[in-house]
Image (cartoon, rainbow, N blue to C red):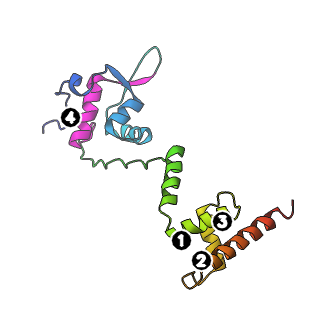
Amino acid sequence: MPDSRPTSASTPSDSCPRAVVSVSEMSRMLGFSRSRFYQLLARGTFPQPVYLLRTRRPVFTAELQAVCLEVRRRGLGFSDGEPIIFYERRMPTPRISRAQKKTSKKTASHSLDEATKRLIDGLKQLGMADPKPSVVMTAVADSFPDGTQDVEPGAVLAAVFRHLKQRDSGENHGR
């Protein structure tokens, strides 16, 4: 039976330009987390790294890199030639920076309906310092559980203003 282990027939310089790489770099090249790569090394799916004598650090030479990439490409284990299915790595969820959050808050305020914008403008004219849309919408919901469709805009403004003033004075009462 022919040897089913992957060979390093492809030139390492094509796919692996560096002479040696660390375990972390090799796992990144293969698309695995470092811990998953160590699991696969222990199972014999990939060849073991060599160790630098001076530092005792495990590294993968250009030849070992080529073998690892071939194992990944072909889906056959290194030591036993057993088929192995490699699932694709999950895409990381994008992190949102503070600047992006501020921008999204600004765009969220632009997406408010006209009635809420007018209500916020009215509250500002009554002396409230920059009321937050979420707070205003909560105050509307608390003051008008059945909705505001049959209520005059001035009455909504007055009720929300009183609600917010009571809330603010209630929080500050014990201080």
Mark 3 or 4: in front is 3
Amino acid type, label 4:
Pro
Residue 71 coordinates in the image, percent (x, y): 25, 38
In front: 55, or 29?
29
Whether residue 12 is visible to the viewer of this picture, yes or no, is yes
Indicate the quadrant containing the C terminus: top left, top right, bottom left or bottom right: bottom right
In front: 83, or 79?
83
CA gap between label 4 and label 1 equals: 68 Å
Q: Check whether the beta carbons of the residues at disc 3 and disc 1 lie within 8 A of each other.
A: no
Looking at the rendered structure, the secondary structure element under dot 2 is helix
The crowding category of the residue bearing disc 4, from other C-alpha atoms within 10 Å (few below 14, some 14 to 19, many at least 20), is: many
Lower sequence index among marks 3 and 4:
4
Q: Which mark is residue 154?
A: none
Lower sequence index among marks 2 and 1:
1
Amino acid type, label 1:
Ala
Lower sequence index among marks 3 and 2:
3
In front: 153, or 8?
153
Amino acid type, label 3:
Leu
Lower sequence index among marks 3 and 1:
1
CA gap between label 2 and label 1 equals: 8 Å
Q: Check whether the beta carbons of the residues at disc 2 and disc 1 lie within 8 A of each other.
A: yes
Where does label 4 land, which residue? 6
Residue 72 coordinates in the image, percent (x, y): 26, 40
CA gap between label 3 and label 1 equals: 12 Å
Where does label 2 land, which residue? 153
Q: Check whether the beta carbons of the residues at disc 4 and disc 2 lie within 8 A of each other.
A: no
CA gap between label 4 and label 2 equals: 76 Å
Q: Which mark is residue 123?
A: 3
Q: Check whether the beta carbons of the residues at disc 3 and disc 4 lie within 8 A of each other.
A: no
Magenta-colored span: 57-80
